[in-house]
Image: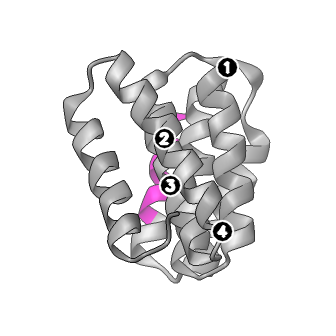
Amino acid sequence: MQSFRALGCCILLLTPCVVGVGVSAKVATAASPAARRGEATTLNNMGLAYFRQKRYQEALRSFQQTLTIKREVKNRRSEARVLNNIGETYSKTGRFQEVLRSYQQALTIERAIKDRKGEVTTLNNIARLHHQGHTN
């Protein structure tokens, strides 16, 4: 699975996003239940590729699937990162209540696990949202 993940990342970096998404989708489909962590990485990479293509609904679907797996395997730090990805994607669709909700969930996790670097990132995301006037 490691080599499949690396292949997906290389393709994302070296070719147009459309090709990378297609290959990553095949890798995600091929993943066994025992390779859930690798599957989550692949799905997250797909979400990032969709995001770069401005295909926000598809990005959200990939990030939501990633989030489900991160919760399943109890990877809290990665769960918070994915919640930030989801928040950023929601911001591109104008769904600002969902943006704030995602960031607040990430912040709660980061504080619970004492991830100060992640906490700073999320606080910056929340501050940017307030600065842009998208909160009540």
Q: Indicate which disc, 3 or 4, sits on the residue closer to the N terminus.
A: 3
Using residue 55 as the reference point, say whether residue 111 is left or right of it. left
- Nearer to us in this view, 27 or 85: 85
Q: Secondary structure at mark 1?
A: helix
Residue wearing tag 2:
104
Q: Indicate which disc, 1 or 3, sits on the residue closer to the N terminus.
A: 1
Which x, y percent locates residue 3?
Answer: 49, 41
**Quadrant containing the N terminus in the rendered view:** top right
Q: Residue at x 43, y 42 (%)?
A: 81
Q: Indicate which disc, 2 or 3, sits on the residue closer to the N terminus.
A: 3
Does 15 appear above or below 34? below
Does 78 appear above or below 9? above
Q: Which residues are magenta?
A: 1-10
Per the model, the C-alpha gap separating discs 2 and 1 is 20 Å
Which x, y percent locates residue 127?
Answer: 31, 60
Which x, y percent locates residue 76?
Answer: 47, 23
Q: In the picture, residue 26 is in which quadrant?
A: bottom right
Query: Hey, what amino acid is under mark 4?
Result: Arg
Query: Hey, what amino acid is under mark 1?
Result: Glu
Per the model, the C-alpha gap separating discs 3 and 4 is 14 Å
Marking on residue 85: 3
Which x, y percent locates residue 122?
Answer: 34, 47
Q: In the image as oriented, which residue stretches furthest toward the right?
A: 29
Q: In the picture, residue 116 is in which quadrant?
A: top left
